Image (tube, rainbow, N blue to C red):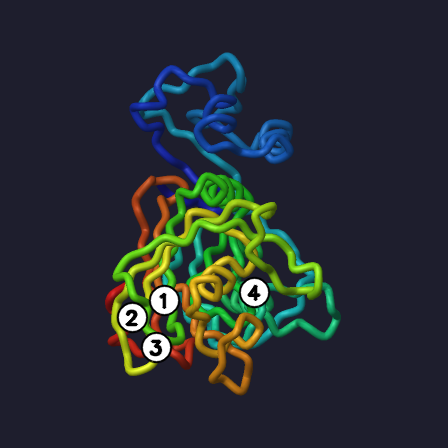
Amino acid sequence: MERHGEWLHMSVPENWSGITIANVMKNKWKVPRKLRHDFRSNEKVLLNGSPPHWKTVPVQSGDILSLKIFQHEDFTLPEFEMDLDVLYEDDHVLVVNKPAGMFTHPNGAADIQQTLWNGVAFYCRKQKLPVLPKYIHRLDRHTSGAVLFGKHALATAILGEMMKNRRISRAYAAKVHGHVENDNGRVEAPIAKDPAHPVKRMVDEDGQPAITNYHVVQRGQDHTLLSLKLDSGRTHQIRVHLSHLGHPLLGDDLYGGRGDALGRQSLHAAALSFPHPFTGEIITCAASSETTPFFTEKELRSF
């Protein structure tokens, strides 16, 4: 797989032999219809140097598939100068360690422009990237750790589908009040909006299904360090479930925690693992304690 200017050239793998370009784009990569139409109508896909008929010409192992995915695109997102902690980067993917206390992206308010995405925009301009990377998932403002970005439209579409199908794995480090009794456990409790609060969520039997798995890493004097993995992705899921368990996050005053004057919670997206969108290689990133006040490097080694 090689990049030449605006084009990516890749060799067709053996397990694709006999299928069409349409099949590759729709079924292998799960590319959305609008993006498939753009590739087809603007001849952004070549097979051995020529535009193929998408629905009739099969690809064969060793054929060269060329994709025009690195065209320059202007963006209007305001830039925010910051030292970006880059955990992984290639031509298709960017993984960044988000600081605690920072939004992942602007939320509509004109005065909220110092977000991680604004920082990525500054990085994009500085590194002369052709396209502004797009975030694949978000973290709450006060949650630190690994955030995944796609560096062009095709990578973003493929990674977005992976996220939807839970092929992207995330492990969270959390410090909670008290001693969690069981070394391993599972919180399976549906979550809904709290009708009495504009932001808060609550456990409600009529809510959306939500599952959080936890493992005790270490018990301190008055707290427990947990490793968490989610089987669902509801808003505030970890915060709600740990409060429901009777062990709210340190600093999370919205859900019964205490201990941080700045309102930050002791929650860190410590590890991120995903198949590379084009090679299939498993990429694993570990987010250091640099962006969180609650964890040490020694504590995060377990993740």
- Near-viewer residue (225 or 302): 225
Going from the N terminus, do you reach mark 4 or mark 3 first?
4
Circles 2 and 1: CB atoms closer than 8 Å: yes
Q: Secondary structure at mark 4?
A: loop
Residue 185 placed where, x, y %?
32, 55
Q: Which residue is mark 2?
A: 300
**Lateral position of residue 77 relative to residue 162, left or right:** right
Can I make out residue 144 in this image? yes
Query: Which label is found at residue 104?
Result: 4
SS at mark 3 in the image: strand
Mark 2 lies on a secondary structure that is helix
Q: Quadrant of the N terminus?
A: top left
Answer few, some or many: residues within 10 Å of disc 1's Cα (few below 14, many 20 plus, some between 14 and 19): many
Q: Residue furthest top?
A: 56
Label 4: few (<14), some (14–19) or many (≥20) C-alpha neighbours in 10 Å? many
Query: Which residue does the numbered mark 3 point to in the structure image?
Result: 223
Q: Quadrant of residue 272?
A: bottom left
Q: Nearer the viewer, mark 3 or mark 2?
A: 3
